[in-house]
C-alpha cells in the first residue's frame, strides 16, 4: 500500500511539474514562473522516487515511476495546453499503461534495497567484531 501511495504522489508531482512547464511555455511573461515552479516540484519529486527505490525492486520502481509520470504528464499537458493527444497517441498511452501493469505483475519478489543495505552493514560489523576479538586475544 505504501508503494501505491508513493507512486501516486510521484506521478502527481511529475504531472504538476509538466503542467507548470506547459503554463510557462504558453507566454514569454510566464516563462520564469513556469520554469521555477516546475523545477521545484520536479526536483522534489525525485526524493519520492528515491523512497520507492529504497522500498523494493529499483527496476520496477523506475519502470512504474517513469512510465506513470509519462502518462500523467501527457494528461496534464493535454489539460493545460487544451490540445488533447490524437487517437493514435491515446492508444500508445494505453499501451504504456498496460505494459506497466504487465511489468508489475510479472516482477519477481525482491528484498527492499534498504533491508539489503542493513544486512550488509550487520555482516560487516560482525566481521569487524570478529577481527577485533582475534586482535585482542593475540595481544
Image: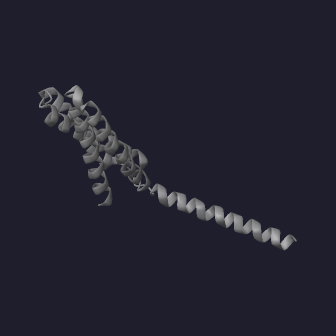
Q: Residue furthest bottom?
A: 137
Check the image and report above or below for 28 versus 72.
above
Q: Residue at x 47, y 55 (%)?
A: 113
Q: Is residue 67 visible?
A: no
Image point (83%, 73%), residue name: 137
Q: Position of residue 125 (x, y in %)?
A: 65, 65
Give the percent coordinates (x, y) of residue 48: 36, 51
Q: Quadrant of residue 62?
A: top left
Whether residue 103 is visible to the viewer of this picture, yes or no, is yes
Q: Residue furthest front?
A: 29
Q: Is residue 68 above or below residue 24?
A: below
Point 41% across, 50% down: residue:
50
Q: How is the image coloured?
A: one colour
56 displayed left or right of 11:
right
Q: Residue furthest right?
A: 139
User: If the image is split into quadrants, where does the C terminus sit?
Assistant: bottom right
Q: Is residue 45 above or below residue 117?
A: above
Image location (x, y in percent) of residue 22: 22, 32
In this view, the residue in front, 40 or 98, is 40
Rendered image quadrant of residue 88: top left
Please count the marks in the image: 0
Taking depth in this image into account, of 80 and 93 the one nearest to the observer is 80
**Quarter holding residue 67:** top left
Amino acid at each position: 500500500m505504501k508503494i501505491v501511495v508513493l507512486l501516486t504522489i510521484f506521478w502527481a508531482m511529475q504531472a504538476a511539474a509538466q503542467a507548470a512547464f506547459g503554463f510557462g511555455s504558453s507566454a514569454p511573461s510566464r516563462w520564469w514562473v513556469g520554469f521555477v515552479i516546475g523545477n521545484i516540484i520536479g526536483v522534489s519529486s525525485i526524493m519520492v522516487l528515491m523512497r520507492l527505490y529504497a522500498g523494493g525492486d529499483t527496476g520496477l520502481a523506475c519502470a512504474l515511476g517513469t512510465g506513470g509520470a509519462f502518462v500523467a504528464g501527457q494528461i496534464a499537458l493535454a489539460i493545460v495546453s487544451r490540445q488533447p493527444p490524437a487517437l493514435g497517441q491515446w492508444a500508445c498511452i494505453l499501451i504504456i499503461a498496460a505494459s506497466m501493469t504487465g511489468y508489475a505483475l510479472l516482477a519477481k519478489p525482491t528484498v527492499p534495497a534498504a533491508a539489503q543495505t542493513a544486512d550488509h552493514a550487520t555482516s560487516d560489523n560482525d566481521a569487524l567484531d570478529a577481527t577485533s576479538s582475534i586482535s585482542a586475544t593475540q595481544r
